[in-house]
Image (cartoon, rainbow, N blue to C red):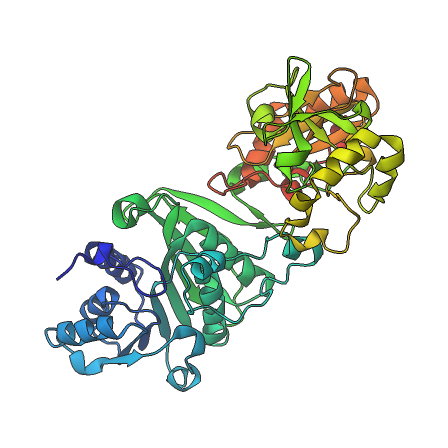
Amino acid sequence: MSNPSKTKIEYGDFQTPLSLARQVGQKLVKLGISPDLIIEPTCGIGNFIEIATQNFPSTRKIIGLEINVEHLKLLETRKKLWERSENIELIQGDFFHFNWEKILENQGSLLILGNFPWVTNSQQSRINSTNLPIKSNFSNDSGIKALTGKSNFDISEWMLLQTTSWLENRHGYIAMLCKTSVARKFLAHLHAKRIGIQQAMLYQIDAKRYFNACVDACLLFCEFKPHIYHYDYLVYQSLESEQTQNIGYRNGRVVRDLKKFEQLSQYDGHSKVSWRSGIKHDCSNILELRKKDNHYFNKLGEIVDVEPKYLYPLLKGSDIANGRTKHTERYILVTQREVGDITDSIQKDAPKTWKYLEAHESYFNARKSRIYHYRSRFSIFGVGNYSFTPYKIAICGLYKKLAFRLIQPIEQKPVVFDDTVYFLSFDDEAEAILIFEILTSQNTLDFYSSLIFWDEKRPIKSNILNRFDPYQFG
């Protein structure tokens, strides 16, 4: 038999190694669950089906659905070697178009078991797979979030959300291997929709070892029970570990470290001033310039001759995170003072800049994001009066550390940032220094840290930063 960990199902998901499936089965037995019906919705070559037959002898029926015919043939061969094989029903079908209602008519407690695909909808499209859900903004992202790509999602996230309708009004369980970030989004969905939960746990697994995947992953376990709403959950360091971390919801929002948060709960509120993100333009080849020997060069290697009126010093997220804030060789053409401004005024105010932009208009027209459609020529986003204040406090959202920086003008011009940076803006230097001291105090850093999930791609977010009002302690 081929190595299951090297075999991919058509969805693009890795098969679960039998050794890991066995560990999951043993953990479920220790949790004391005893389902009447077990469903593995993408069963592959059947490693979870096998451990289900071994660990749940009282289960009346085990159902496996698989789209790949070759995998089903292999599974049929393996099935003949197992005891209680008459309780196993194997079905060839596609999760996204399968009629689950008839199967779910079975009474009793239900366990949904397995390992959904770990790819995103955009990745699935790139491999020309047709196994996708019907495209919709299923997370209900609105406006700019949906347009700028926030609605790109993991296939497993969509599939997990579908299973909530199977369990919403009955007693049952989910035991699913998935990315840790997907598990948290799923639990947040249960909280937001007030779906009945008895208990939930995450058991971290070594995705590099089992799947050769560099991602934080876990076994997600949930017990569903109508009219019980227990949304705090435990995170274990491994399937064998007894050490836990408590995660839950306070004031309607998720908290990573409940113990630390509750010590500093007086810090939780809403900031009177909003953290802004830097400039989004999707045209770095043209708008971002580097200064060398008193000349400006774009990323195409061209010498650029423009007026200083629209040119501002630029600090990127890496500069902020690493403390490179006093000097810069990077500059950016900021074509608008406010989102929606007409850019044609540049022609009169700075004719050399206008000539440069027009000569490279094809780069602007090639921008794919819908946010630029039907906007003024050379439009950008993430710009406003706050972009041009002389003093700022900035932090990069991508780095796994709380590194606030006090930013002052460079070459007597206000500094602007790329869209990986969040910042507060100030006209008064003394005020900026006072707020900076508050933000960098140990209590403030501990409070923010209790909210931040450091394994996420962008761990520091504006909605987290905005939960603390520095003026309340100023």
In-image side of 252 versus 128 (left or right) = right
Q: Is residue 421 above or below residue 128?
A: above
Q: Position of residue 142 (x, y in %)?
A: 68, 59
Give the quarter of the image for residue 435: top right
Q: Is residue 200 above or below residue 267?
A: below
Q: Position of residue 238 (x, y in %)?
A: 31, 46
Q: Is residue 316 above or below residue 30?
A: above
Quarter of the image that includes the N terminus: bottom left
- Viewer-closest of 265 and 134: 134
Q: Position of residue 388 (x, y in %)?
A: 80, 29
In-image side of 103 versus 289 (left or right) = left
Q: Residue at x 88, y 39 (%)?
A: 345
Give the quarter of the image for residue 299: top right
Q: Position of residue 108 (x, y in %)?
A: 37, 80
- Viewer-closest of 371 and 458: 371
Count of numbered tags = 0
Give the quarter of the image for residue 335: top right
Residue at the extreme left of the image, as rendered:
81
Is residue 177 at least partly visible in the picture?
A: yes
In-image side of 415 versus 164 (left or right) = right
Q: Residue at x 20, y 71 (%)?
A: 53
Quarter of the image that includes the C terminus: top right
Residue at the extreme top of the image, as rendered:
293
- Viewer-closest of 431 and 209: 209
